[in-house]
Image (cartoon, rainbow, N blue to C red):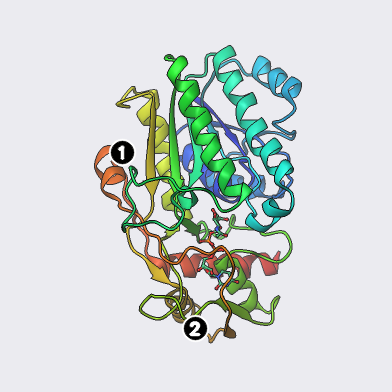
């Protein structure tokens, strides 16, 4: 019998790519998603790629009764990979309570279920946002966590603390938090990808939407930073590389390879790229000029952040395989495919 894993937020951007990797690795995937920021169509995308449509339940994880019923009906879940959360920085500033209630309420309900239903392995979707503006680069896992600049960022920090404290008293459970740098790109089939509702906040969907004509031009936020070309530097990571790390992290827990019952890993490539470098790579791979202008800095932006990959490479046994050009080409193919749909 196939091992069952539950992916919360599994119709979303990173969740859907992770569902594909789990199915391809031989697991049975169950998905819970409230579809607040994704479409049910991604299940068809997953099926087209893998030949399997995951079992899907639409409800909100803050609904404890429904969640309990779900676990009651699925007593054999071996691992939970928890993505479901709100993730828009600006919105979180405007609606902090909504972010705390949803992101932390969901997490606490799920952790309770792990205990009640003896699901021993829990993988959490965290973010490099916990490091703020790092004092030293590249950022290691033991670099200090800095005070969050938004309620969104704070939900990631508090979530990590909740998991850490829970694992201290629940020695039968084990968890890994994965701190993502900047996930971009799409599956090479172009059947699944990022689907921002409304105007994208993030760089790459804004680039592809501009190139395809949905947006007039891209604003590059800040050109006078203390960086080689004056624009901000990030560690962009291909979403498929990122998705694969979740299978590896889950198997580390399932096979008892973990060194403690709460671990965390940075997931990045180790390479920092500027906004202008991303644009250049996009122009090369899409074979067209992008309409962009240099504008004022965006408040709250970190100047430079990229990951130290040593711990993830050596201890987790995971490495990225795709480069920035792969990320841009796949993001562009996905945008084109969306247009045709
Ligand atoms: C943001 C969040 C981060 C979150 C991540 C995923 C902030 C400060 N951080 O990361 O916490 O985990 O999204 O949703 O918001 N840029 C432009 N023009 C644009 C959009 C972006 O120049 O239209 C630039 C930004 O200034 C930045 C880079 O592109 O330098 C990447 O931005 P973005 O994709 O929004 O990601 P982060 O800000 O790194």
Vertical side of 270 occupied by 71: above or below: above
| CA gap, disc 1 and disc 2 | 37 Å
Helix, strand or loop status at disc 2: loop
296 or 4, nearer to the observer: 296
Q: Position of residue 242 (x, y in %)?
A: 44, 49
Vertical side of 136 occupied by 33: above or below: above
Q: Does the image show residue 249?
A: yes
Q: Residue 113, located in which quarter of the rendered image? A: top right
Q: Single out the residue that lies furthest toward the front.
A: 147
289 or 220, nearer to the observer: 220
Q: Residue 8, located in which quarter of the rendered image? A: top right
The residue drawn where x is 68% and y is 43% is: 99
Q: Which mark is residue 316?
A: 1
Q: Position of residue 298 (x, y in %)?
A: 59, 70
The residue carrying mark 2 has its beta carbon less than 8 Å from ligand 1: no
Helix, strand or loop status at disc 1: helix
The residue drawn where x is 61% and y is 48% is: 152
- Left/right placement of residue 68 relative to residue 145 reads right
Vertical side of 35 occupied by 82: above or below: above
Q: Position of residue 290 (x, y in %)?
A: 56, 84
Q: Nearer the viewer, mark 1 or mark 2?
A: 1
295 or 276, nearer to the observer: 295
């Amino acid at each position: 019998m196939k091992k069952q894993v539950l992916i919360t937020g599994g119709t979303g951007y990173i969740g859907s790519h992770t569902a594909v990797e789990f199915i391809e690795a031989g697991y049975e995937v169950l998905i819970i998603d409230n579809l607040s920021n994704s479409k049910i169509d991604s299940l068809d995308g997953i099926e087209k790629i893998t030949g399997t449509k995951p079992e899907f339940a639409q409800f909100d994880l803050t609904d404890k009764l429904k969640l309990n019923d779900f676990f009651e009906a699925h007593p054999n879940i071996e691992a939970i990979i928890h993505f479901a959360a709100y993730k828009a920085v600006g919105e979180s500033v405007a609606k902090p309570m909504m972010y705390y209630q949803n992101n932390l309420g969901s997490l606490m309900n799920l952790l309770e279920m792990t205990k009640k239903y003896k699901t021993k392995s829990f993988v959490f979707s965290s973010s490099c946002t916990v490091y703020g503006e790092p004092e030293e680069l590249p950022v290691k896992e033991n670099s200090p966590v800095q005070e969050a600049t938004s309620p969104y960022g704070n939900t990631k920090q508090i979530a990590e603390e909740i998991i850490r404290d829970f694992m201290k008293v629940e020695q039968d459970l084990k968890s890994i938090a994965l701190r993502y740098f900047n996930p971009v790109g799409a599956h090479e089939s172009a059947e699944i990808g990022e689907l921002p509702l409304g105007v994208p906040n993030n760089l790459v969907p804004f680039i592809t939407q501009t190139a395809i004509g949905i947006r007039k031009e891209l604003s590059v936020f800040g050109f006078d930073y203390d960086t080689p070309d004056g624009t901000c530097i990030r560690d962009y990571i291909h979403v498929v590389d990122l998705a694969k790390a979740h299978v590896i992290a889950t198997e580390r827990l399932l096979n008892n390879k973990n060194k403690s019952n709460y671990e965390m890993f940075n997931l990045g490539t180790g390479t920092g790229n500027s906004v202008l470098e991303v644009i250049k790579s996009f122009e090369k791979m899409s074979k067209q000029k992008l309409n962009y202008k240099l504008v004022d800095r965006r408040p709250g932006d970190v100047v430079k952040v990229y990951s130290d990959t040593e711990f993830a490479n050596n201890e987790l046994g995971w490495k990225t395989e795709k480069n920035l050009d792969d990320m841009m080409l796949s993001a562009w193919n996905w945008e084109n495919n969306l247009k045709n749909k």
